[in-house]
Image (cartoon, grey):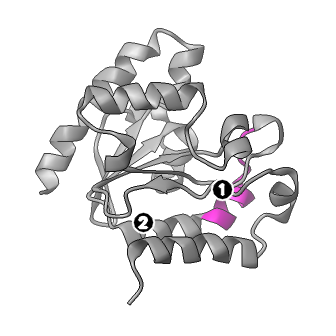
Amino acid sequence: MSTKQQQLEQIAADIVTNNVCPDLAKTATHLVFGEGNPDADIVFIGEAPGRQEDLHGRPFIGAAGKFLDELLEGVGLTREDVYITSILKYRPPNNRDPRSEEKDAFMPYLFAQLDVIAPALIVTLGNHGTSCFVPGVRISTAHGQPQTWQGRTLLPLYHPAAALYNRKLRQTIIDDFAMIPTCIKDKK
């Protein structure tokens, strides 16, 4: 029986083998599959890797990632406690928004990641992450409101990058993030 980490590595290998989104793959430096604890109770899902993530092959390591680290620390967590990934596993050129066909192509692999990790809480970060699980929902109205998705709790939150562009959202993001321990406690 393979370990969860081995299963995750196989899913990443399948993305390459199956040539998912070849146009994105050829403009990307790295596949940014995800990282963290494969036994995590919490999985964070962003939309796509940015420039820094693409260069280093790791999710959320740019400015938004630094804010995510602060947010985790604020609720007593570290990156080692959670699993962090994105819908798209390759950076879209010029950080453009993910296209619907790209999201559709990567969703089976994201669902496979979630099946392996089996988190109690899925935290979607931003509109793209949230709308893939709750179609038609806008993050501006859904943020901080736990939902149920396939028997799991889903907590839509603003993407940490939103605070970099709109300082007024910083406190909202911090307040919403503070709900995470309660959402986890309720599931245990």
| Left or right, residue 64 beside residue 13 | left
* Vertical arrangement, residue 68 with respect to residue 153, above or below: above
| Left or right, residue 166 beside residue 75 | right
Residue 59 picture quarter: top right
Residue ID at (29%, 22%): 175
* Vertical arrangement, residue 133 with respect to residue 12, above or below: above
Disc assigned to residue 89: 1
- Magenta portion: prevailing SS class: helix
Residue ID at (73%, 36%): 51
Disc 2/disc 1 C-alpha distance (Å): 14 Å
Where does residue 151 sit, x and y in percent of width and height?
27, 65
The kind of residue tagged 2 is: Leu
Q: Secondary structure at mark 1?
A: loop
Question: Is residue 136 visible in this depiction of the protein?
Answer: no
Where does residue 67 sit, x and y in percent of width and height?
46, 25
Packing grade of label 1 (10 A; few <14, some 14-19, many >=20) is many
Give the magenta-colored segment's residue range. Answer: 96-106
Query: Residue 169 magenta-drawn?
Result: no
Residue at mark 2? 114
Q: Nearer the viewer, residue 32 or 176?
A: 32
Q: Nearer the viewer, residue 23 or 137?
A: 23
Disc assigned to residue 71: none
Q: Nearer the viewer, residue 58 or 142?
A: 58
The kind of residue tagged 1 is: Lys
